[in-house]
Every structure is written in C-alpha cells, then in structure tokens.
Amino acid sequence: MDVIHSKLDRNNYRLTDQRKAILDVMLENQGSHLSAEEVLWEAKKKFPNIGIATVYRTLEKLANLDILHKSMFEGNKFRYELAEDDKHHHHHVVCLNCGQISEVSGDLLHELESKLEQQGYKIIDHELKFYGYCPACK
Amino acid sequence: MDVIHSKLDRNNYRLTDQRKAILDVMLENQGSHLSAEEVLWEAKKKFPNIGIATVYRTLEKLANLDILHKSMFEGNKFRYELAEDDKHHHHHVVCLNCGQISEVSGDLLHELESKLEQQGYKIIDHELKFYGYCPACK
DNA sequence: TATAATAATGATAATTATTATCATTATACA
DNA sequence: TGTATAATGATAATAATTATCATTATTATA
C-alpha cells in the first residue's frame, strides 16, 4: 500500500476519495479479474455517486503505473487485477467451459503444462506474449 | 489448402466466392495480424461488394475451425492470422512502440527471452495464457 | 487568508467494434 | 422445376470505451 501511495505521489496523482474507493475495491479482490463495470458497482458501496468515467480513468492510470494489470480473456471487455509487486508475469488458466480464471506460477512451458495436467486440468492451448521493444525501436 | 477445404466440407460450409476471397486474403498475409476491417478492404479488391457482416461471420467460423487464430494485442479490436497446421501455440512479440507483431518459436520461457534479447529486442513483460478445462469441467 | 491556476469529477454525448435482424439471393437436393 | 436451406448485404442494435464540458475540489502563491 505504501508502494502504491509513493507511486501516486511520484506521478503527482491526487489520492481522491473516489480513487481510494477504487483502490480499496482492487485490494479487497486480489486474484479476481474485475471489469470496469464491476469495479463501478463495488466502488459505489464506498462512494455512492462515483461515475463510470472516473472508474475508467482511474483504472487506466493505475494500469499505466503498473499498480493494476489490464488484460482480456473473452467477452470483448478488459479486466483489471492488482499487480503483484514488481512482478511482470501474468500466467492464467482460463476454463473454456466456466470461464474461471486461475493464477499459475512457474518457469518452463512444458513443466507448467504437465503440472497443470497433474492438477487435473486439461490443457488444449496456450498463448504467450512478450511485451517490449523491437531492435528498431529500442 | 486441402486441409482447409476438407475442414470446411466436413462442417458443411459452402466455399462461396466471398469466403474464398477472405481465405485468399489470409493466405496472402501469412504472419500478419489483420483486423476485420483490414480484411474487408483487402477482400473488396477481390469481391467488391462484400459486406462487413460477412467478413465478421466468416472470420468467426474460420477461427472456430482453427483455420484462423483470433487474438487481441491492443486497441480494443480482434486480429486474425492464418493458423499454422495443427499448431496451437501462438508466441508473439509485440513492440510497445510501433505495434509490430512478430512470431516466435521455442520452448522455454527464459531461453526464449534471452534469445530475443540476443536478437536485439528489449523484453519488458510477457503474458502466458493456457486454454483448457479445469478439473471441475473436464 | 484570499485568490488564481490546475486537477479531478460526473453527466452524458460520441465513437468504435461487434452482433443481431431481416429481406433477398444463391445453392443443394428431392 | 420446385422447395428447403444456407449465405449474403444493408443496416439497426448493442456494448464497451473515450471525449467533451461545465462544475467542484485541491494546490500553489501572492
């Protein structure tokens, strides 16, 4: 939480009540992947007349600061989750049937895959993306 | 190409001129990731009054048959590329600066990462998703 | 402290990608 | 040939996200 505060400070972002409400929602829902609308309804419990625009703006800002991680699994909408400190790895298992998203950790692709199968998953496919800069842009 | 035809036959999909145009576009653009709109404009060169709805319907069908791979990198829109035969692995490098998407092949996460760095990339982040069925649904 | 400059907000309009609808056309098949 | 069905194109509808803008809150400064 201190890390978050200092990141906000460093970037001259005011910690308004609305932003505090959104951060609290994310902190209370570690591990789950919330859509902007879901965040809105949860945040409304803490700050009833918060607007959807503020939610979008705040989520975007927090994602840019690596406080949140933004990803898309299905359904044409982005989902946000609290990023683990300094971890830039996001390994997920998405169930094609129920849509449940679980976290995975580990290093080797096949090692991971067989570990998951040992845990009872049936792996059909996987997707790996690297983000960075290409030689021309670096 | 025969593989594609037999897949379509097997599922009772007619190979109309419009679908042929779309498939040709995808075959001519192997390795690049086209949005539905980009496919539309390319397909119009071959079949001028093809409609956007047909493009969306066809891309969706072809993706369901694993003829195309559907993915999203940024910009809130899906992109499609020809799937390599029976390969269910999609490794991409997305340049955060120019948006260029390149293919990667290999097995080990860190091995890949260091190989990419050797090739001149600067890797900031990566994302790995497994698709399958969880123990409860399997 | 008073005031000016700036940041943040909420309401809502605008945009954009995608999906649904529906009348028309093309195709397969009896 | 006639009939059932599939596919299409135009376009309306939907849904997520972004932009606009007047208002409010906060900070900096005189």
Image: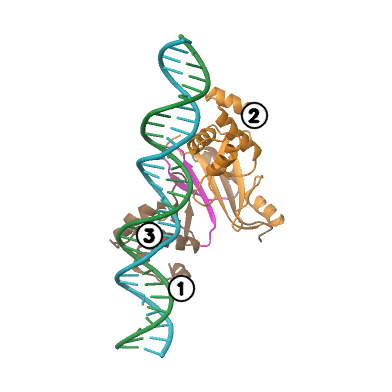
Chain colours: A brown, B orange, C green, D cyan
Give the spatial CA distance, label 2 vs label 3. 48 Å
Disc number for residue B1: 2
Asked whether the beta carbons under mark 1 and mark 3 sit within 8 Å of each other, the answer is no
Judge depth for marks 1 and 3 and give the one in front: 3
| Position of residue B129 measured from the top left corner of the image (x, y, whole percent) | 53, 46
| Position of residue A30 measured from the top left corner of the image (x, y, whole percent) | 41, 56
Chain on which label 3 sits = A
Q: How many marks?
A: 3
- The front one of A2 and A130 is A130
Same chain for labels 1 and 3? Say yes or no.
yes
| Position of residue B51 measured from the top left corner of the image (x, y, whole percent) | 50, 36
Q: Is residue B90 magenta?
A: no
| Position of residue B39 measured from the top left corner of the image (x, y, whole percent) | 57, 40
Judge depth for marks 1 and 2 and give the one in front: 2
Residue that numbered label 1 is attached to:
A12
- Give amino acid for label 1: Asn
Residue A120 seen in the figure: no
Answer above or below: position of B111 versus B59. Answer: below
Residue that numbered label 3 is attached to:
A53
Residue B62 seen in the figure: yes
- Give amino acid for label 3: Ala
| Location of the C terminus of chain A (image quadrant) | bottom right
